[in-house]
Amino acid sequence: VHSFPTRRSSDLGTELDETSAINFNLGLNLNQQNKGNAEEYDIFSGSISYSKFLGSNLLIPYIVYSKPNYRSQADINTVMIGMNNRYIINNQNSIVYGANFARNKYDNNDKFSTANLKNNETLGATLGYDYALTQTDLFNSKIFFNNIDADIAYNSYESSGLSISYSHIFPIGVFKLERIFQTDSYKAKDTFYSSTINRKDNSITSQVTLTGQLNKVIPCFDNLDKDGTFFYYINFKNNNMNSTLLNFNTEKEFLTLGVTKRFNFNE
């Protein structure tokens, strides 16, 4: 199955002083695919974040709201609060760390009369390390853990994993290679699929991303975007998941294209 998502978003941001800023974001993701509509969706999202430098620490608390609308699944309302922080050791080394809490609530209707059984709360944490080999080359490694408690036990699970990435700055934008290894271990058997097998999913995700200012790849766009506030996003992702329950064995490929317009209140 090949899917073809598009992404549109708008950023609003302003500096509060020399060490802090606030940012707002609104986004809409649309996905269509060439075989069926099982994975087609549109996702509306919005967020607000605050960034603050305190000595060697960069603190970024945030709030996110998301409403995915999958064609073959019940709609979800997600509210998340968290922080993505960084401790800067020196020009080449830094430690990244964060935590988040989210509440996911599914919409019940005539078609999805038991969707509320998936309602859950998620508590997560990340810890990573950045190494800048040069001014244009960055290596990153990160471990993460999430605990998902659903209203019914067989939808509850623990998720953990490791991501490794390499980024390089080109004149036209930032190129990034990333691989993510993830394991999801479910806390109870889902007897609809099996009364004897505990579900455990192991997945590997590989992706290639290129992001940058739109006028760097379309020179004539300079006349329309003199301040460089339009940004493009290109991502190709392959996800391969193996599960102890064969129903959940999947391999998916995604191609995402997006354009973002950024506004600055100080201008």
Image: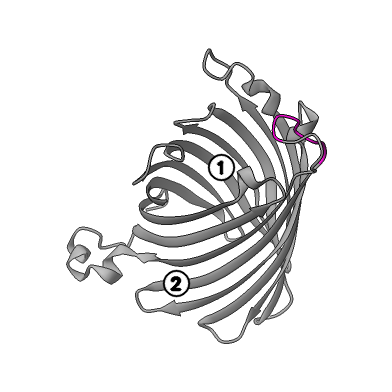
Which residue type does callout 2 highlight?
A: Val
Residue 248 locus on image (x, y percent): 62, 45
User: Residue 4 in magenta?
Assistant: no
Q: Is residue 259 left or right of residue 139?
A: left
Rendered image coloring scheme? one colour
The residue at the point 40 percent across, 55 percent down is 256
Give whichever of 259, 197 is nearer the camera: 197
The residue at the point 53 percent across, 84 percent down is 135
Q: Please give the residue where the numbered disc 2 appears in the rendered image.
A: 174
Q: Give residue 238's mark.
A: none
User: Residue 189 in magenta?
Assistant: yes
Q: Earlier in the sequence, mark 2 or mark 1?
A: 1
Q: CA distance from mark 2 to mark 1?
A: 24 Å
Neighbor class of circle 1 (other Cα within 10 Å; few <14, some 14-19, many 20+) is some
Label 2's element?
Answer: strand
Label 1's element?
Answer: strand
Neighbor class of circle 2 (other Cα within 10 Å; few <14, some 14-19, many 20+) is some
The quadrant in which residue 190 appears is top right
Q: Is residue 124 above or below residue 114?
A: below
Residue 137 locus on image (x, y percent): 54, 82
Give whichever of 242, 162 is nearer the camera: 242
Question: Is most of the magenta stretch helix, strand or loop?
Answer: loop
Q: Please give the residue where the numbered disc 1 appears in the rendered image.
A: 48
* Observer able to see residue 62: no
Q: Does the CB distance between marks 2 and 1 fall below 8 Å?
A: no
Which residues fall within the magenta stretch? 187-193
Q: Is residue 59 left or right of residue 255?
A: right
